[in-house]
């Protein structure tokens, strides 16, 4: 459930050499987005993944379950993003199936 004021924060800034369309496509990919509060969004900003990873792992509790899954990985790239997207899709389908929501 999304709360008022929540924002979607990409976990991996895309390298500058990528063309604009590719950058936007990768940046906005569901596997690369985490729903967090505006405060967390400001805190993470456009920092590189390794900085976000370190800051996340210093916290006493995760920002979200999806971010917990992402920040279990010490590195992040578009390949991991796609893997994560597929993992989330499987979890959604499993949840819907087990709860007769499909």
Image (spheres, rainbow, N blue to C red):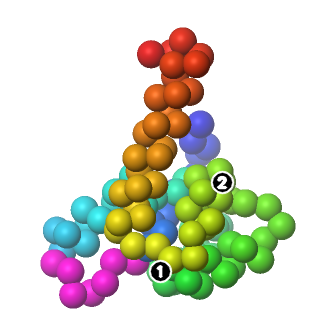
Q: Say above or below: 41 vs 29.
A: below
* Nearer the observer, 55 or 37: 55
Residue lying at 41% horizontally and 56% vertically, measured from the top left:
83
The residue segment tinted magenta is 13-19
Task: Please say whether residue 70 is visible from this viewpoint.
Answer: yes
Residue lying at 83% horizontally and 67% vertically, measured from the top left:
60
- For residue 45, side relative to residue 59 (left or right): left
Q: Looking at the magenta stretch, what is its main secondary structure?
A: loop
Residue 17 within the segment the image draws in magenta: yes
- For residue 39, side relative to residue 84 (left or right): right
Q: On the image, numbered disc 1 is attached to which residue?
A: 46
- For residue 50, side relative to residue 40 (left or right): left
Instruction: Please state the horizontal and vertical placement of residue 3, each as a whole percent of the image.
Output: 61, 43
Quadrant occupied by the C terminus: top left
Asked if marks 2 and 1 touch (Cβ < 8 Å), the reply is: no
* Nearer the observer, 66 or 28: 66
Q: How many angstroms separate mark 2 from mark 1 (CA)?
A: 18 Å
Specify the quadrant of the image occupied by residue 42. Answer: bottom right
- Disc number lying in front (2 or 1): 2
Instruction: Please state the horizontal and vertical placement of residue 91, each as a whole percent of the image.
Output: 52, 37
Badge 2 or badge 1: first in the primary sequence:
1
Q: On the image, numbered disc 2 is attached to which residue?
A: 64
Label 1 residue SS: loop
Q: Residues within 10 Å of mark 1 (few under 14, many from 20)?
A: some
Residue 37 within the segment the image draws in magenta: no
């Amino acid at each position: 459930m999304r709360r008022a004021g929540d924002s979607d924060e990409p976990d991996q800034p895309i390298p500058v050499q990528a063309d604009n369309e590719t950058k936007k496509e990768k940046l906005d990919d569901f596997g690369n987005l985490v729903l967090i509060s505006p405060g967390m969004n400001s805190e993470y900003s456009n920092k590189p993944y390794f900085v976000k990873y370190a800051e996340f792992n210093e916290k006493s509790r995760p920002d979200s379950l999806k971010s917990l899954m992402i920040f279990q990985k010490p590195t992040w790239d578009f390949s991991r993003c796609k893997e994560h997207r597929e993992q989330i899709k499987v979890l959604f389908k499993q949840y819907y199936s087990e709860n007769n929501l499909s």
